[in-house]
Image (cartoon, rainbow, N blue to C red):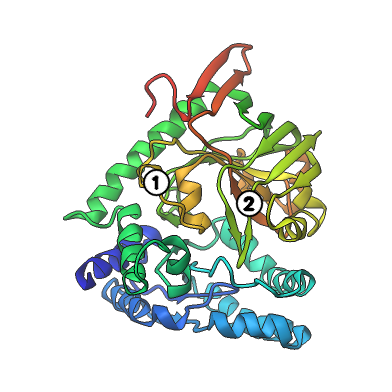
């Protein structure tokens, strides 16, 4: 297992952030600090980074138990001040050209029993503090990647069917398989994978799609895409032209919806673990792009906290296509972690868009609205894919083309 974990660390450093000689690296930032259970793996990342020529590696250590207790009983104003102090070092290294790795592994039951209003205040304060930096990061000014590792609390939820002593090991095996990191040469395997994803994105871009129509049980949704949009996939460049992969694993191709161009209803097909709160059975109704009704069978307060965060969190920011026969979907495993579950299912994101329109990465925020892009503190993916999902594309030339049938790519574009 140790050798596989080292290969995985190399993959994250060399394919994920594509660390360059002389470049600083930050491991953990904002809400995603490095937990005590990740010490050994973080050390492997540090070693891989210095082997790749890093000038300096910063690890931001944290503790999820402390986080829960502080949100439940601590002074939330001081928590906000602490976030401001953390941001100073993050921005200092950003000015030196740092790359960023986070290890998302939140306990799906972290905030059980904690008042929802305290969770919302704490999460909002950190999001607001890091908003400018996160905007830079998601605008590809910095190279970054999300790649996970197990914790006991997470493994207890994912593999509750196993004896407790076997759960973390089983989740490690799942993560390494999902990340395409178990072969003889994971880096070569990823180069091939990136080419396939980019081929799918090119096919979609060549179609010149105006609107996507989603149909499945509980879903009848039309999503007009932003003017001048394009579909992106893993391996796109930062603003200096250096390629990186923002998520390991990744199976998606994705683009930006038109903010006011979403109509109809959509139902989730998988649970959503949002920062330690579990949300199930999401149903949303849209008019002119805006969420006008929302409901969850479980986690209604957490869903409300997402959608009512600001005006922009009433709109969509991302449309992502993932077939039900993706390798992660074929594992038939709910991870209760969006990094993995979103790569087993088509998904949408509530909140902030990625500026995936022509000239978007240089577009001032003041001009986003005019290009149909949504802005928000939030960017929360939820899964809507299933073996019953059909998607049709209405093209600008008036023709209609099937994109998905029964949850899979249509027209041989798998």
Relative vertical location of residue 17 with respect to residue 87 in this rendering, above or below: above
Q: Is residue 2 left or right of residue 46?
A: left
Q: How many marks?
A: 2
- For residue 7, the mark is none
Which picture quadrant has residue 186?
bottom left
Which picture quadrant has residue 84?
bottom right
Q: Nearer the viewer, residue 218 or 149?
A: 218
**Callout 2: 10 Å neighbours few (<14), some, many (20+)?**
some
Image location (x, y in percent) of residue 108? 56, 65
Which picture quadrant has residue 393?
top right
Image location (x, y in percent) of residue 318? 62, 44
Q: Residue at x 59, y 76 (%)?
A: 91
Q: Residue at x 57, y 77 (%)?
A: 90
- For residue 280, the mark is 2
Relative vertical location of residue 294 with respect to residue 64 in this rendering, above or below: above
Q: Is residue 168 left or right of residue 261?
A: left
Image location (x, y in percent) of residue 349? 63, 47
Image location (x, y in percent) of residue 280? 63, 51
Locate the C terminus by quadrant: top left
**Callout 1: 10 Å neighbours few (<14), some, many (20+)?**
few
Relative vertical location of residue 4 with respect to residue 311 in this rendering, above or below: below
Task: Determine contact: label 2, label 1, CB under 8 Å.
Answer: no
Q: Is residue 226 visible?
A: yes
Q: Is residue 366 left or right of residue 36?
A: right
Q: Earlier in the sequence, mark 2 or mark 1?
A: 2
- For residue 332, the mark is 1
Q: Residue at x 62, y 19 (%)?
A: 394
In the rendered image, the residue lying farthest to the left is 184
């Amino acid at each position: 297992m140790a050798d596989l974990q080292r290969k995985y660390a190399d993959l994250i450093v060399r394919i994920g952030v594509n660390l360059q000689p002389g470049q600083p690296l930050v491991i953990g930032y904002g809400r995603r600090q490095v937990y005590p259970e990740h010490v050994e793996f973080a050390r492997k990342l540090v070693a891989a980074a210095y082997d790749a020529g890093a000038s300096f590696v910063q690890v931001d250590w944290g503790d999820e138990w402390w986080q829960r207790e502080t949100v439940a009983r601590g002074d939330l104003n001081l928590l906000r001040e602490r976030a401001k102090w953390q941001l100073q070092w993050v921005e200092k290294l950003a000015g030196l050209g740092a790359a960023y790795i986070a290890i998302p592994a939140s306990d799906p039951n972290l905030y059980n029993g904690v008042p929802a209003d305290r969770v919302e205040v704490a999460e909002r304060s950190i999001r607001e503090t890091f908003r400018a930096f996160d905007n830079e990061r998601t605008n590809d000014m910095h190279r970054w990647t999300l790649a996970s590792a197990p914790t006991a609390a997470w493994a207890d939820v994912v593999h509750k069917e196993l004896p407790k002593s076997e759960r973390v090991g089983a989740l490690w095996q799942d993560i390494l398989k999902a990340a395409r990191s178990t072969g003889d040469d994971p880096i070569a395997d990823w180069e091939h994978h990136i080419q396939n994803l980019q081929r799918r994105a090119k096919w979609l871009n060549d179609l010149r799609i105006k609107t996507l129509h989603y149909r499945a049980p509980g879903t009848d949704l039309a999503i007009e895409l932003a003017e001048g949009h394009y579909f992106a996939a893993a391996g796109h460049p930062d603003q200096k032209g250096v390629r990186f992969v923002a998520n390991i694993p990744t199976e998606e191709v994705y683009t930006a919806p038109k903010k006011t161009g979403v109509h109809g209803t959509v139902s989730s097909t998988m649970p959503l673990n949002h920062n330690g709160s579990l949300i199930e059975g999401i149903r949303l109704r849209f008019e002119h792009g805006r969420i006008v009704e929302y409901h969850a069978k479980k986690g209604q307060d957490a869903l409300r906290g997402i959608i009512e965060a600001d005006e922009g969190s009433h709109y969509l920011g991302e449309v992502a296509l993932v077939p039900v026969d993706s390798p992660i979907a074929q594992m038939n495993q709910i991870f209760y972690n969006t990094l993995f579950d979103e790569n087993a299912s088509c998904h949408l994101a509530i909140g902030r868009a990625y500026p995936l329109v022509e000239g978007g990465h240089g577009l001032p925020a003041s001009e986003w609205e005019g290009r149909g892009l949504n802005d928000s503190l939030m960017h929360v993916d939820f899964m809507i894919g299933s073996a019953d999902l059909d998607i049709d594309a209405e093209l600008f030339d008036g023709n209609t083309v099937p994109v998905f049938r029964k949850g899979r790519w249509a027209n041989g574009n798998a």
